[in-house]
Image: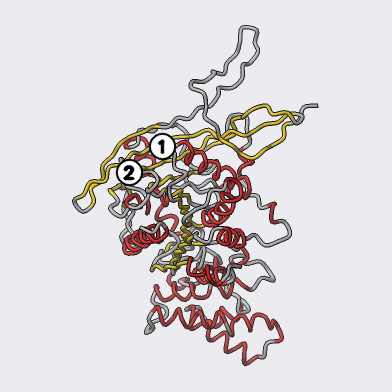
Amino acid sequence: MVNEERGEVQAGTAKPGTTEAGTTEAGTTTKPATPVDDLVTTRHTLTIDGAELRYTATTGRIVLREEVYTDGKFDGLKPKAEVFVTAYTLDDAEAAERPVTFAFNGGPGSSSLWLHLGLLGPRRVVSGDVGELAAPPYAIADNAETLLKYSDVVFIDPVSTGYSRAAEGEKPGDYHGFTRDLESVGEVIRLWTSRNGRWMSPKFLAGESYGTTRAAGLAWHLQKRYGMYLNGVMLISVVLEFGTLDFTPGNDLPYTLFLPTYAAIAHYHGLIPDRSLEELLADAERFAAGRYPNALAQGNRIPADYRAEVVTRLAELTGLSEDYIDRVNLRIEHLRFFGELLRSRRQTVGRLDGRFTGWNADYGSETPDRDPSMNAITGPYSAALNHYVRVELGYENDLPYEIINADAAGKWSFKEFEGQQITVAEKLAEAMRMNPHLQVYVGSGHYDGATPYFATEHTLARLPIPAELTPNIQTRYYPAGHMMYVHEQSRIQQAADLGAFIATATNQ
């Protein structure tokens, strides 16, 4: 009996050319074509404050190969996936001194176009913002705040996102899970670093949302598997401990950690007048860290006057009615909040960005039909990416560019965490203990209802690292949502913050 034993994902250089699949005169089918890298290189110039930034863009799919064994014998490297990357490298730079950042978004199941065309890349989408959204067919523009000023950047689309696909005959679902995702993205990073002679360059990871889960895991995986130590990890809209976001029965923690974000969103929409945002957030944080969790922990043992006090305080902090808070037993679930807050106006608020509003078909529904903040940005980003890759970068592929693969997201496997909390906080902490030079940037939006900033603070406060390493973590906050760069002021500030972070982490 022949068995194919799965090894760790590995990439190798494909031989030039392919073997075409077809049918012989005898009627037998030949083997599928051997996939090869299809990278395209173009050169560009970006003018910033009168100075020219000359750079090279390399985009296309690289083939990931895996070591295959049959009955314990090595059968060589087998193509398993083709991963789409876009790399920007500054021309005539000294490789050993020039930082490189590997960037990706999250989902899971999301491509990297959000960070690519929203914040870090040399070109950016013109999407508009709340109250002034751009209209089709949209536009793209030079990004004077690009991270390329400080670091080369490699954008990675995990398997089944963007143009990335499993190789012919392979199962995409094999990559839709925590460990295989780390292995495949980690192999792309190792391969690119090796092929481009960048092992001596300062190296960074930049992840957003589930991309922060991936980045924290990768910081650990790259060190343990390849001995690749990083200078820094940039975490944008953070989720390291899934229990902080999981509104399942018996877990009261998210109700408290989301409270300051509810307050911020209510304040933005004018439901808590006569208080500054800073004052309101400080008040909400104190209550969320003290009397509120104490009240929830008491359950039905809570005295009636104490419960009434909590109802009143929650109404003051969230803009919701005391009657509603009483009926939900002091526990405000986030999707229900987005549907309830502006119900009297017949509007819903965004999950990714609570500044955005939208409409339901039925205002008796508890939750929004869709996320209005996601609706606002999908069109501009999709149009910009599909135009940009073909017309400006010269890469052609007739596959649909998968912005977000809902099937991958819905079937994502966390089998490694069966019977325990899904968390990578310990992996990040171990990576920091192993590499005391590892710096961590954490960026959060006050109106982010997907990964609330107070939940992130809760996780960071409990990282198992020595006190000497806590200065390695810097936190920044922005008056925007999950994709804070949609807000122009936040985009400019965050770009400057990331540039300063890279300079600090490389002693520039």
Q: Nearer the viewer, residue 390 or 456?
A: 456
Against 249, residue 435 (above or below) is above
Q: Is residue 348 visible?
A: no
When asked about the image quadrant of residue 504, the answer is: bottom left
Q: Which mark is residue 333?
A: none
Amino acid beneath label 2:
Ala
Write the residue at 33% across / 39% down.
56
Which residue carries the number 2 mark?
Answer: 93
Please provide percent x and percent y for residue 28. 65, 13
Q: Residue furthest top?
A: 25
Which residue carries the number 1 mark?
Answer: 59
Q: Does label 2 or label 1 sit earlier along the sequence? A: 1
| Element type at mark 2 | loop
Quarter in which the C terminus is drawn: bottom left
When asked about the image quadrant of residue 217, the answer is: bottom right
Q: Is residue 40 left or right of residue 257?
A: left
Quarter in which the N terminus is drawn: top right
Q: Nearer the viewer, residue 496 or 409?
A: 496
Q: Is residue 507 visible?
A: yes
Q: Dot 2: within a 10 Å radius of its alpha carbon, few (fewer than 14), some, or many (20 or more) residues?
A: few
Please provide percent x and percent y for residue 259. 52, 75
Q: Nearer the viewer, residue 368 or 472?
A: 472
Against 173, residue 504 (above or below) is below
Q: Residue furthest bottom?
A: 305
Write the residue at 67% across / 38% down.
7
Q: Marks 1 and 2: in contact by CB < 8 Å?
A: no
